[in-house]
Amino acid sequence: MSKCHDEASSLAEAKLVDCSVCKYRALLAENKCVLGDICVAAQSGRQIDRFFKRNPQVAPNYLCDGFWERRAIASRYAPLDMIRNKPLDRDEVVRRVVASRLPIDELDDYLHDTDREVRMMVAERIAPERLIALLSDEDYLVRLQVAKRLPFGQLRRMAHDTDREVRKEVARRMPPFALSLLAKDEDAEVRRIVVSRMLPGDAVKMLGDFDWVVRLEAAQLAPVESIAELVDDVEPYVRAVVRQRLNDFLVEDN
């Protein structure tokens, strides 16, 4: 949206706002509200935000306002104790704001919120040891956030998640000695991450993989005495790596 369009919208909206009946009209003289630019009565999130930024003491008065955006913005500026005692809002945007501000040990009411972005916010903030409550969340984006923060000792519980993006994140974080759990994953992209981080001895298990990139990674990592079976691999890049490693090994051995 262009600046000109924004200005035109603000001017049009200003005509709909009557400062004479606003209980905060005294703020006009203090330059703490400006018709068409900084206004709590406007239907513009930008104007409302500017108003609360200059007048945060007024925010508590709008925590139960009829306009969801005004409630959401007021929740950013109101004292924590006031939003902490506020009942769960009917609008998901307001709940996202509240969930972003509450202390991490006060998020239980939002763990199974109907809105996935609220649950994602909780998964980003809650103590890692409590993420187990979201392991089976119906939305993969929530589970992906869980996989990014779950303690290493719990990651194996997500090794067989139904979504490959979640399993890819697990493969990036799982300790190398435990990566064998994902060695036979159905998705080649997951296995590529797995083999790139495996211990050399475990990489031997990947030498016969159907995906040539996996075999290539395994051929570069596995002990040289185990890779001879790939000397005639159908993929030229794999053959080249295997033959080079075997030749280097023979030279060193001599």
Image (spheres, helix red, strand yellow):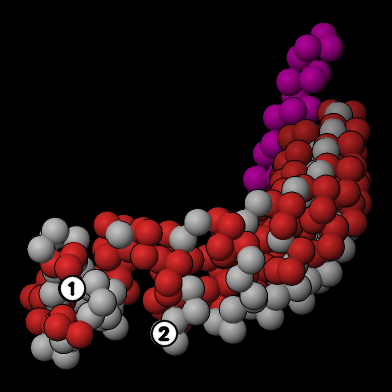
Q: Quadrant of the N terminus?
A: bottom left
Measuring from the top left, give residue 206's x and y in whole percent. 85, 48
- Whether residue 42 is visible, yes or no, is yes
Question: Up-down: is 197 above or below 97?
Answer: above
Disc 2 vs disc 1: which is toward the camera?
Answer: 1
- Binning the other alpha carbons within 10 Å of mark 2 as few (below 14), some (14 to 19) or many (20 upward) gives few
Question: Up-down: is 182 above or below 248?
Answer: below
Measuring from the top left, give residue 111's x and y in whole percent. 75, 67
Amino acid found under the numbered disc labelled 2:
Phe
Measuring from the top left, give residue 232's x and y in whole percent. 79, 46
Q: Quadrant of the C terminus?
A: top right
Name the foreground residue: 31 vs 177.
31
- Residue 241 among magenta residues: yes
Look at mark 1 in the image and give the residue it sits on: 25
Q: How far apart, in angstroms, are the residues tagged by discs 2 and 1?
A: 20 Å
Disc sitting over residue 167 in the figure: none
- Say left or right for 153 vs 47: right
Per the image, label 2 sits on a secondary structure element best described as loop
Q: Quadrant of residue 226?
A: top right
Amino acid found under the numbered disc labelled 1:
Arg
Measuring from the top left, give residue 17's x and y in whole percent. 18, 86
Look at mark 2 in the image and give the residue it sits on: 67
Q: What stretch is highlighted in magenta?
A: 236-254
